[in-house]
Image (cartoon, helix red, strand yellow):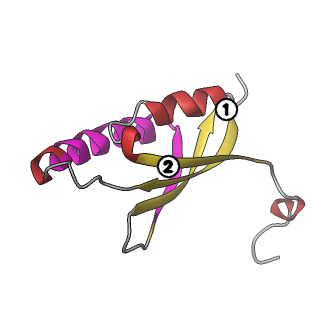
Amino acid sequence: MTSHEFLVRVRTTVPADVSAEEWSAVVAAERRRGAELRRDGVIAHIWRVPSDEAVENIGVWRAADRDAVQTAIDSLPARPWMQVEVTLLEEHPLTAIPLGA
């Protein structure tokens, strides 16, 4: 099966009506699921994006197709509070040049 890479940008905003206790449980479940996706090779790289307004991250995800990456995103416990952008990535010709060459 061919795997593609996708740039996934996630912005999570916690609604005011979610209690701190409820949110802590969501965060714990989110970390467990994220760790599974990382171990499975779906999340290849992930970075936190500094923000005062929301929790944001950018990652490179690997999946067979857009539907598969969407299924992985939809499996995240915090998905109801996420805005997600998914962009298919293709290799750039410069990647053929060795680093330091």
Is 54 drawn above or below residue 65 in the view shown? below
In the rendered image, residue 30, in percent from the top left (x then y), is placed at 30, 42
Secondary structure of residue under mark 1: helix
Quadrant position of residue 3 = top right
At label 2, the amino acid type is: Gln
Q: Which contiguous range is marked in magenta? A: 23-48
At label 1, the amino acid type is: Arg
Question: Is residue 32 highlighted in magenta?
Answer: yes
Secondary structure of residue under mark 2: strand
Could you tell me which residue is drawn at 44 percent across and 42 percent down?
38
Q: Residue furthest bottom?
A: 100
Could you tell me which residue is drawn at 20 percent across and 48 percent down?
18
Residue under pointer 2: 83
Q: Earlier in the sequence, mark 2 or mark 1?
A: 1
Is 88 drawn above or below residue 1 in the view shown? below
Main SS category, magenta section: helix
In the rendered image, residue 94, in percent from the top left (x then y), is placed at 86, 65
Q: Is residue 22 left or right of residue 64?
A: left
Packing grade of label 1 (10 A; few <14, some 14-19, many >=20) is some
In the rendered image, residue 46, in percent from the top left (x then y), is placed at 49, 56
Residue under pointer 1: 66
Mark 2–mark 1 distance (CA, rounded to whole Å): 16 Å
Q: Quadrant of the C terminus?
A: bottom right
